[in-house]
Image (tube, grey):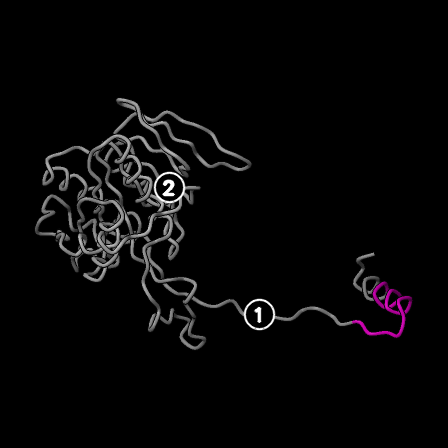
Amino acid sequence: MNICVCIKQVPDTNRIKIDPVTNTLVRKGVPSIINPFDTYAVEMAAKLKEEYGGKVVVISMGPAQASKALRVCLSVGADEAYLISDRAFGGSDTLATGYILAGAIKKIEELEDLKFDLIFCGKQAIDGDTAQVGPQIAEQLGLAQATYALDVSCTDDHAIVKREVDGGYDTVLVQTPAVVTVVHTDQMPRYATYSTRCEAKKKQVHVLSSAELSELDLAQCGLSGSPTRVVNTYTPSVQKLGIMIEGSSTTELVDKLVGILDDKRLL
C-alpha cells in the first residue's frame, strides 16, 4: 500500500491580523504550521501503512521553509519527503497548483520506482478554503476521487471510504488508484517523539524544481498559468444599526417599540 500525501504549510490563522490601512495580512511574527486537515491525512496514511505495509511519501509545493513541515511529517510516519519549489511556480492558483502537483506525483513514482495506490490531501487549506486542489489533482491524473473522508480501508483494488455528509456519513467503494480528501477524524494525529524527530533530521527532503519536472508546461504554472488571482483583500466595515429604546417601564418600552415598527410600516 503506497500512499502519497499532499500537505501545505500555512500561516496560523488564529494569529493572523489585518492591517486596517493597507487591508493586507500582517505576516510578521505569525508562525507557519501544517494545514490542520493535512495532519489528519498524514495520520490516516500512517495507519494504513501499519495495517497493510508499503510506503508513505509526503509532498509539498512552496518555498524552502516548507521543508520544516515535511520533516514534521517524517517524524510521524512518513518515509520520504519531496519539496516542489521553483520561482516559476510562484503565484499559482489552485488550477496551476493541481497541475504542478499531478506532474510531481508522476515524477516521484518514477524516482521511487512505485505506483501510488492512494493520494491523500486535506479537504481544504485554512488559508484559502477552496477545497479544489485535491479534486483537480484527480482530474489531472484521470483518477477516481472521494472527498470528505472520515475513514479509509482497502481491498486488493478498491478503497472503502466513509464520507462525512450533512447529518451523518455515507460509504463509497472507489477503484484504486484514487485521490481522497480528508476531514477532521476521530483519530487524532500522533505526536513525534524525541527519537522520531532525530530520525527525521537525518532524512533527506528531496527538492524538485522545474528542471526536474521538465515535462510540465510552464505556461500552465505560476501567475501566467493561473486564470484566477486575488486582486484585493479588505476588512468589512462594522456599522452599528441598532436602536436603543429607553423607558421607565415595560409598558412604555413596548409602546415605543410598536411606534417605531409602525412608522417603518413593519406592523
Whether 176 is among the magenta residues is no
Q: Which residues are magenta?
A: 245-258
* Dominant SS type (magenta): helix
**Mark linked to residue 48:** none
Of all residues, the one furthest to the bottom in this rendering is: 21
Q: Amino acid at mark 1?
A: Val
Which percent across, then down, holds residue 216?
14, 45
Which percent across, then down, holds residue 107?
13, 41
Q: Amino acid at mark 2?
A: Val
Q: Is residue 224 left or right of residue 206?
A: right
The image quadrant that residue 137 belongs to is: top left
- Which residue is more in the foreground, 127 or 41? 41
In the rendered view, would you say 130 is above or below 231? above
**Mark linked to residue 238:** 1
**Mark linked to residue 182:** 2
The image quadrant that residue 42 belongs to is: top left
Whether 246 is among the magenta residues is yes
